[in-house]
Image (cartoon, grey):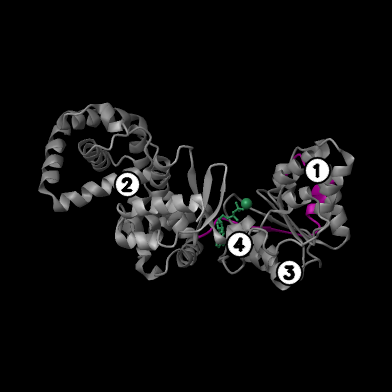
Amino acid sequence: MDESTNLLQTVLDNLKTEVKDDAYSELFADLSKVHKTERGFIFVVVKNALIKFRLEQFYLNRMNEILNTLTDTKMMFKFILEEEIDQSKGVFKDDPQETKRMREISLRPLKPEYTFNNFVIGTSNRFAASQALQIAESPYAVLNPLYIFGEVGLGKTHLMTAIGHFVLDNDINKNIVYTTAQQFTEDYFYYTNIPKGKAEIETFYNYYRSADVLLVDDIQFLDGKASTQEEFFKVFDYLHSHNKQIVLTSDRPAKSLKNMMSRLVTRFSWGLAVEIGAPDDALRLGILKKKLKSFVSNPELVEEDALNEISSIFTVNIRELEGALKRFISYCVSFDLPFNKENVKVALDGILPDDNKSEASDDAEIEKIKGIVAKYFGISTSDLSSSSRKNKIAYARHVFVYLVKTKHDTPLTSIGKALGNRDHATIAHSFQKIKDLLTSNPLTKQDIDNLTKLID
Ligand code: ADP
Ligand code: MG
């Protein structure tokens, strides 16, 4: 075994004494493979995205803490999915002539989960999706370019990437080039400014001209950038005249790109423009159900009411909607809570849209409670924010969290800030700890009752 695998094993052995058995076997039992160690990061392979998310949210800090008691040099764990390792999978042709730099710019994978299969269709994206599919089935035909536009977080990148996957699924030898307009700009400046100058710019041209399908994300980034537009124009014309498919996304219609050269704006409308709009209730719920299936093995445990609740809070951005679902699931799993509506609010605490409203007035109140709790336990207020793990101090800290949360419904992240910048997960642990003790330990109940009287 190499050294980092050994370290991982030792950290896991330590954790085993701290984590409940079933959580341990679910989350940690399969962790054994180190992908690589690089600049102090140990990349540990995990088997799916939800496990990765849960580990990052709730255990990574603790794992790193333990790790740093074992080594003299500063080291950190990072988690990586199998599919992320296998980055360049199938997306690019293998060309032995390729220069090293050419390789570097071609190592941009299509996100594996952005497929048509995973794209839920509703009123707001039906037309866009049907046209995208048509182009994926017969690219290089008439609708060139396809111009997808809409607000942020509504699925433009997903849909564009799905075209790339579909084409590849039918013909692995097709060269799909995905880039963002920003990356395109950076590439251009990089290849024109390196010492060899002209010779190297060929690498840039060759790369973009070699595309069978060119996917350019967030084209609005080129607005106002005249010299890059000029380059993009050349690439566009080259590919278009060779009947190669071009797909663009943008946050606005082409005619609203005010500082884009008119030659380009005209070309953007040669093909077809489709808009993706805001998702309605049915689509949001549909997306939540679809994502749920990929997150958990028994989605039926999640109450429909809970999904409705999440859907009613996050109405304008699908990325946020998805983030909220992940957080809710991992929270309930970690604390062994039912997946119901009541727990949605607790789990999403800190990311709810109106959470930041009354923070200022809360600050004074939090300080007041800190003083009362410290005095009650005979410690100082700085002990509460310190990193001390002494039982008495840790217990006082848990009690403080519980009181602030129940009295003022302060977001856990804000409570964390008041405690020397502890993270959301740590504060959540404290809160649950006291909740549990309240049902099992009369002394805790006594403490909470006493303190509540002192505070009121
Ligand atoms: P945009 O490029 O418009 O900002 P993305 O394509 O990055 O948005 O989508 C944001 C997130 O929402 C992604 O995780 C994506 O998978 C998801 N998403 C968006 N629309 C859908 C949909 N119709 N079905 C499933 N997931 C979707
Ligand atoms: Mg995008």
Dot 4, crowdedness within 10 Å: few (<14), some or many (≥20)? Answer: some
For the residue pair 148 and 210, the one nearer the viewer reads as 210
CA separation in Å, label 4 and label 1? 30 Å
Q: Which of marks 2 and 1 is nearer the N terminus?
A: 1
Q: Which residue is drawn at 84% across and 52% down?
A: 206
**Front position among marks 3 and 2:** 3
Crowding around mark 1 (Cα neighbors within 10 Å: few <14, some 14 to 19, many 20+) is: many
Whole-angstrom CA distance, mark 3 to mark 4, is: 15 Å
Nearest-to-viewer mark from 3 and 1:
3
Compare marks 4 and 1 and give the one earlier in the sequence.
4
The residue labelled by disc 2 is 428
Rendering coords of residue 348 (x, y %): 38, 50
Range shown magenta: 257-280
**Residue 391 percent location from the top left of the image:** 22, 39
Residue 394: quadrant of the picture: top left
Is residue 67 positioned above or below 418 on the image?
Answer: below
Q: How far apart are marks 2 and 1 (CA)?
A: 49 Å
